[in-house]
Every structure is written in structure tokens, then in C-alpha cells.
Amino acid sequence: MHLLNHPFSETKFLSSSCTEDLQWEEKSGNTELYTYRAGEDFGSHVKMGFIFSKSMSENMKNQQEFMLMNARLQLERQLMMQNEMRERQMALQIAWSREFLKYFGTFFGIAAISLTAGAIRRKKPAFLFPIIPLSFIFTYQYDLGYGTLLQRMKGEAENILETEKSKLQLPRGMITFENLEKARREQSKFFIDK
């Protein structure tokens, strides 16, 4: 038995010899058998071929849909995991800033009182100058831990993404598979030559 393929279709027919003639015609993308000239009863083979090819194509289609759905689900899980990690890192950064603020706030309070008292006793206002940079650090940490600094940073980042995309481009453009393969081959050649 030989397997004959229609050139324009995935449907397959079984034939008892290569010389026997099958006539087919394309209708709406499906191959239909019209006559079998050798006069042999060929109906059972054709029906079996149609059923077999139809079930195979349905199985393949179902498998492709399942693989696509699985890939999409895996991508969604990866995105969710990355977002969870980002949120945890941001929470740690805010918690660190609040904890740092407690210690620095205590230091800043003691330093401000001591420097003010020293400036009054010695009548030298120069003792008050260290309070200025320390107050900037204190204000920044307070804004990061309890204020709106993160919301302002987020808004500015969104503005940069929308209006200043050219500043975000990598030198030499996006990394491609071809570039990575070229670098890998050059590195492999380098190690092999040594």
C-alpha cells in the first residue's frame, strides 16, 4: 500500500498501486474523492483515511492550543512573580528608610540641640551651619519613609517613559539572539585557540 498526498491539502489517501488514477477536486479547502478508475472498492480506505487525518489534525490543533495556553499561563506567572519581588524590594527599601530615620532623627535632634546651645553660649553662629546639611538628609529620609517621594518618582518615571524614550535606549540598540550567538562563538573560538 502506498500513501498519496494531495499537493494542496493535508488529507492523505491510501492506494493499492502508484499507477492507479485518483481524481480529486478542491472544495472549500478540503479534498474530496470523486472517482477511482481502477474499479476497485476503495471506499473503506478513503473513509478510514479521512477519519484518521481528521482526528490527527484535531489532536494537533488541540495540542497547539494547549501549548499556547500553557505558554501564556507561564508568562503570566513569571510577570506576577517579578511584580511580587519588586513590591517586596520596595517595601524593604521603605522599611529601611523608616528605620534609618529613627536613628538619624535621634542623632539630628541631639546635634541640633547641642549646636544651638554651643552657639548661644559661645556667641558664635558658625556652630549652627552643620544643622543645614543634616536637615536636608533628615527631610529626604522623612519624605522617602512617610512622605510622597515615591509617588513623585513614579510620576516622573511615567513622564520619562512617555516623552523621553530616546534617553532609555541601550547603546548599539537592543540585544538580539544573533549578537549573543556571535559573541558566544567568538568566545568559544578564543578558548579553543588558547
Image: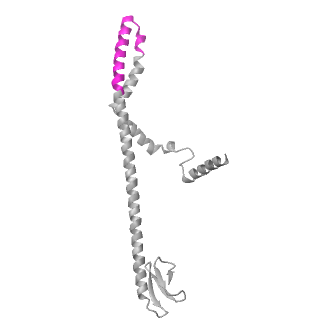
Q: Nearer the viewer, residue 174 or 163?
A: 174
Residue 62's quadrant in the figure? Answer: bottom left
Q: What x and y, as percent, mark residue 92?
A: 36, 35
Look at the image and give the residue range highlighted in magenta: 100-129
Residue 63: in sight, yes or no?
yes
Q: Residue furthest top?
A: 122
Q: Tally the numbered discs.
A: 0
Specify the principal SS of the magenta part: helix
Residue at (41, 88) in percent of width and height: 43
The relative height of residue 164 versus residue 99 in the rendered view (above or below) is: below
Q: Residue furthest right?
A: 193
Q: Nearer the viewer, residue 126 or 188?
A: 188
Q: What x and y, as percent, mark residue 194?
A: 67, 45
Q: Nearer the viewer, residue 140 or 176?
A: 176
Residue at (58, 51) in percent of width and height: 179
Residue 120 magenta = yes
